[in-house]
Amino acid sequence: MSRRANPKLVGAFVLAAIALLVGAALVFGSFTFFEVTRRFVVFFQGSVDGLTQGSAVLFRGVPLGRVVDVGIRYDPADSSFEIPVIIEIRPNVIGRYSPPAAPNTKLIEQLINAGLRARLESASLVTGQQVVQLNFFPGTPIRLEKTDLPYDQIPTVPSPTQQIMSSVDVAARDLPTLIKDATVVLDRLRAFLSPENEAAIHSLLENAAAAMETIQTDAASSAR
């Protein structure tokens, strides 16, 4: 016949397990285990090197959440690859200092229309780590990828580094035209400064100087 479990022993074990769980939450997650979170997907153009699971999600530098996953999505229809980045946001970071508001199912759509965008920014030049920075960029285009992932999508804008590289690429593409135009200008300047033109210019300047002397002499004579 099996012995009946001691209720006091079971209760003490349960209390100890709860204490360990709460302690772990305090140390490792600051109670994020119990927080309500919301997930979104963003698609960055180009490389996401330096962005990993656990990377910070910020709003104007304020910690707002974290990167949950970074994956690769292949579409056999057009043989294209995309990099979906799943981010997790803690609404209470905003809510605890904001006035109460009525539930709004179209809030994210309104924020996107107002310019809410995500972009990659460097967290450390030494380690190369990157973060997802949320901010408002009014007037920027809303570029949304076609996806069947069960998350609302936040549009992206190029990072400062990508903008610089894009400017360099444009300058590189325009460089042959600029060189050609500069060559034409130099050829015209060289032709203008040919010995024949130089002699003509020298003669023109001498005639102008002689004319000025004549005018000054006539003016002096009229003044007497």
Image (spheres, rainbow, N blue to C red):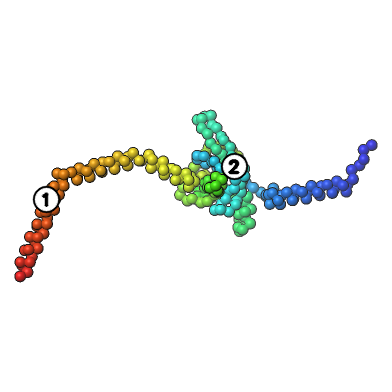
Numbered mark located on residue 93 in the image: none
Residue at (54, 31) in percent of width and height: 75
Residue at (47, 51) in percent of width and height: 138
What whole-number distance in Å separates the C-alpha atoms at marks 2 and 1?
A: 75 Å
Which is more toward the observer, 201 or 92?
201
Q: The C terminus is located in which quarter? A: bottom left
Please provide percent x and percent y for residue 103.
61, 51
Q: Secondary structure at mark 2?
A: loop
Q: Is residue 147 above or below residue 133?
A: above
Amino acid bearing label 2:
Thr
Q: The N terminus is located in which quarter? A: top right
Please provide percent x and percent y for residue 55.
60, 45
Residue furthest out toward the bottom:
224
Q: Secondary structure at mark 1?
A: helix
Which is more toward the observer, 163 or 187?
187
Numbered mark located on residue 52 in the image: 2
Amino acid bearing label 1:
Ser
The answer to whether any part of residue 151 appears in the image is no
Please provide percent x and percent y for residue 89.
61, 48
Q: How many marks?
A: 2
Residue at (41, 41) in percent of width and height: 169
**Dot 1: within a 10 Å radius of its alpha carbon, few (fewer than 14), some, or many (20 or more) residues?**
few
Residue that numbered label 1 is attached to: 203
Nearest to N terminus: mark 2 or mark 1: 2
Q: In front of the other: label 2 or label 1?
A: 1
